[in-house]
Image (cartoon, helix red, strand yellow):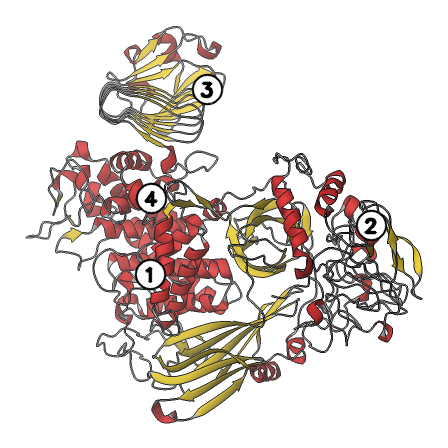
Amino acid sequence: MPSHYSDFMATFDLLASYMNEAGNSTSSQSAGLFGSQFSASGMEAFLRIATEGHTGAGAATAGGSGSGSPLHATATTGAADGSSNGAINNWYANISNGGGEAGHPGLSIPSWQQGAFNPMNGGDILHGQPGGGGNYSAVGGGMSHEQTIHSSGGGSTPVYSSGAAGGNSHTGGSYTGGNSGYVPGTLNEGNYGGGSYMNGGDVRHETNVYNNNGSAGSGGNSSGGSSSSGGSSSSSGGSSGSSGSGKSGSSGSSSSGNSSSGNSSSGNVDKLPDIPGDFYESVGKLNQKGLLYAPELDQAKGSNEVVSIRLANNGNKQEAADHYTFGHVFAEGDVPAGKALVAHINGIQVPLQMDAKAFHDDGSVKHAVLTLNGPSVSSGKAIDVMLSTANSPSGSGSISASKILSNGYDLTVDFKIESGKDAGKTIHIDAADVLRDAMKDGSLTTWLKGPLASEYSAEVEVNDLLTARFNVRAYADGSVMTDVVVSNSKTFSTNVTNVTYDVTIREDGKVVEKYNNLDHHRHGTWHSEVWSDDAPGLQVVYDVPYLFETGAVPGYDLSTGVSASDISGAYNKLASLNTGPMGEAGVFMGMPAPGGRDDIGILPEWAVNYLVTQDARALKVMLANADASGSVPWHYIDEATGKVVSIKDHPRLYLGESNIGGVTRPEGGVSNEGTGWQIDNAHQPSLNYLPYLVTGSQYYLEELKAQTSWTVASLNPDSRGNGAGVIESDNQVRGQAWSLRNLGDAAYIIPDKDPTKAYFEKLLDSNLDHYVKKYVIDGAMDSAGELEGYIWRDRYVAPGAVAPWEDDFFTLAVGTLARRGFDGADTLLDWKTNWTVGRFLAEDEGFNPYVATSYRIFVQDQQSGARYSSWDQLRTDSNDGSQSFVGSPNAADGYPAIARASLATMVEHGAEGALEAYGFVVSETQHLSAKFENAPTFNFAPTLGPDGARIEAANHIVAGKGNDTVTGSSDNELLHGGAGNDKIVGNGGDDAIFGGDGNDKLYGNNGDDFLFGNDGNDWLNGGRGDDFMKGGKGADDFVFDVSNSGRDVIDDFTPGVDDIVIKANLNGNGIDSAADALKALSSDGHGNTILDLGGNNEVMLLGIDPKDLSGADFIIN
């Protein structure tokens, strides 16, 4: 987008470089200039350094003069008649109105800083006070490069203002208007503020931002050396500025002049200037092994702070200040109902608009589309933006659709149909006409509405098959983005066929995209974003751990990293893929094909690559594949509603290809012929959920709805219960998993006001209710006995068998729903625990845990069909005596990797035994961390402990087969002894400690720890904190020898075998003998024993009655 600050970006580059070096430079000139705060004294020193060596002199004020030292130049402003009218502060107070001696120009530093740097005592930053002949951003003169933007002298009527004579449009510190409302010719219709913005300083008022009939001066070239508004400015050669007549010209008219470089494409005035502060060197982190990691962003500290985002410049040139629209998801309660969201950079508020779309049950914002007015950022740099709650937004008013039209919106699409009955026909569509007609007939819809951006949508039929939709987003700086969407998605009114055409898109009469002989196949869409100016050049980078906390996405392991070569390889491969309209990009077109691939999972590999690295190339790959979803033939629009088809409206609707009688079909039936696609529920990837979440794009939202609608309508109506939409009966277990995933994504993130939201919510609720009623309440699998917990399907991978990996997919999907708080998901996970977790802990019951990851596990007698009910009856298609995991154990998408992710889900859920099973699997699959570097789809990391910190691979310490000492750190860790007699010590944090084989000693020390002795005669000492201890096989000692040990739990205590070891008189409890210990026992009334250790410290023995214990079970030291 254009910026009138380009003339002095070099100054800001220098400023940014000094800020990055603040306090760290070895230069005697720059060391410690600013420290942690951008101070006036630091600025003075910086200006002294920055201006040395530049030539030129003269006053830079409009119609005024200047004199003095470089840092204390007295600047004057022009009065109404053009004469000097006294000083306006010095450099300390008003940097933008500076003068300079020969050799020391007054720098044009943006005058918006608070405190000592606040210009014009609360007046306008980029123009003066209405009716008062105010100064408009007079700039310093004399730098050896072009540095001037606009300087306008005082006149009888001020330039770019509309307040009453003598009034102040910033009364009360309002952002852009105070009482005056708005500036003529701008898009901003209404008061954009009311609250203080940097002590009342206005960032900008934009005049005629859509018209080409005027720019930011009333006569004169502002960057070629002559001044606008009759004032003076420095030339690019460094000559001094000369005084002008001081007349405003044309009574302060803002037309007929030229702005920067003598021309302005949109008549914009100056944008938000650079923000001083912490600029980061890169977006993410790349280590010496060539692995990419997500960057660590500034963390919320204040009570109102929520989360930060980062604006990163990945390009090779400086990006000007611009507007950025993106999506963001928030944890429940973080943005409460009735609260606004504001943005700060280094404590300075910058304009932000929030269009809230989806809400949590408590009314707080769940998902919103945000528009931020971001600063200029140099190449390779980035800056963090803190999002905080406030009582009121930073602006008000909105950009109207009529204003877009009146300011010359010009986009056209021309079709030449090459096939079908319209062959040879040319069709011209003017988007402005479509928008205008929609306003008249009431069909215009609004997506965004506010002072920074508004987006309106309208559509028109191209012919009997094709529909064109225009999502028109206008920004306050005058730029427009039009998302042109062409669809061939009708369902009932016409026989939808493939159609070939030429299409040309023009913006302002210039061809921006053209496709010849485009084969637009049935039930597909494509889109193209057309920008009136260059698209914004910065990437919005997210605080990934925060996204995990919201439950919107699974918690992946951020410590592993992703191969940079894989990221670059996938990005470079895009050049050879079909990423245009109807292209498949990197999406696998033959979905039913067997075998592992990168699109299978809760999120596909390319989306996880982006999520866990925030790499810009990975983002482009993800969005290219999201665009490709438009070519998948699952787009069906109900002409009566204009929405995706619904089995609520059409209970017998069937979008599958099987020959089923008595169903409702689309006109002409269902066929994928000529599309190149084969689609099915069992292998469908998640293509648009994350893209919509992070972009807020209507196109990706509609794609998500189209896929989810097809997911249900493609099932046999007889099996799904017609309009009930039950997904179990006519679906493989993995198909059930991905169907639940899709329904959950749609129900979670579709805007609340969208009528399809309630539809998908109802379908999800009815399916969860179905599973809970069938399996939990009615006990459909009670006959499976101790094996209960798997989803059964008669037609499975083999008669009498289940595919445990498919069931793990199902667990992953339900776990995602549980994290998002959907009713019934937790209950279903509780029921599944017995199978999902139990098959890794059933060795004592006769089942080898290493074959729990087999391709097939037979749960029925293949001859009689009788269902097995005990672990020792099971057999697999693997070597049942295996002593290492089976099922592609070395693959990042092998069955052990999938099981590991499923168990991580169960650990986060808090399922009984899940952490023990997870520890075992992790200890046996340490090699997978290296595999996950190339394919992180199933690289989940569960949370552990009350602080919610994740135990990632970087905090896994697994010993070998010898007698080892394993010592942890203060982090939350997973410590495993492996084989041998080991000593394992946690040194703070909330740890999961496993003895493994052998006679081990486990020490939790500080923190709320989980101790598992596993095999052998083990010694478990939780230390301080609330600890969980399970001895496992063998005779185990549970030790309590530190005061204030907390409230601990012992599982699997065996009286007469295990011992409780207590330090005498611990906590002054008076327990000096086993008899005293017995007196300290009581029952909790639920089958458990409580041992009171005094001082509010106690031990609960699960499943033990006090009368089962004797003095022989206690050792007092």
Count how many numbered circles sit on residues in the image: 4
Label 3 to label 4: alpha-carbon separation:
30 Å
Quadrant, the C terminus: top left
Q: Residues within 10 Å of mark 2 (few under 14, many from 20)?
A: many
Q: Earlier in the sequence, mark 3 or mark 4?
A: 4
1044 or 553: which is nearer to us?
Answer: 553
Which residue is disc 3 drawn over? 1097
Q: Earlier in the sequence, mark 2 or mark 3?
A: 2
Q: Are marks 4 and 1 in contact (CB under 8 Å)?
A: no
Callout 1 secondary element: loop
Which residue is disc 4 drawn over? 830
Q: Residue at x 61, y 36 (%)?
A: 25
Label 2 to label 1: alpha-carbon separation:
66 Å
Callout 3 secondary element: strand
**Callout 1, which amino acid?**
Pro
Q: Residue at x 28, y 76 (%)?
A: 672
The mark lying in front, picked from 2 and 4, is: 2
**Callout 4, which amino acid?**
Asp
Which residue is disc 2 drawn over? 101
State left or right for residue 378 relative to residue 742: right
Residue 429 appears anywhere in the view: yes
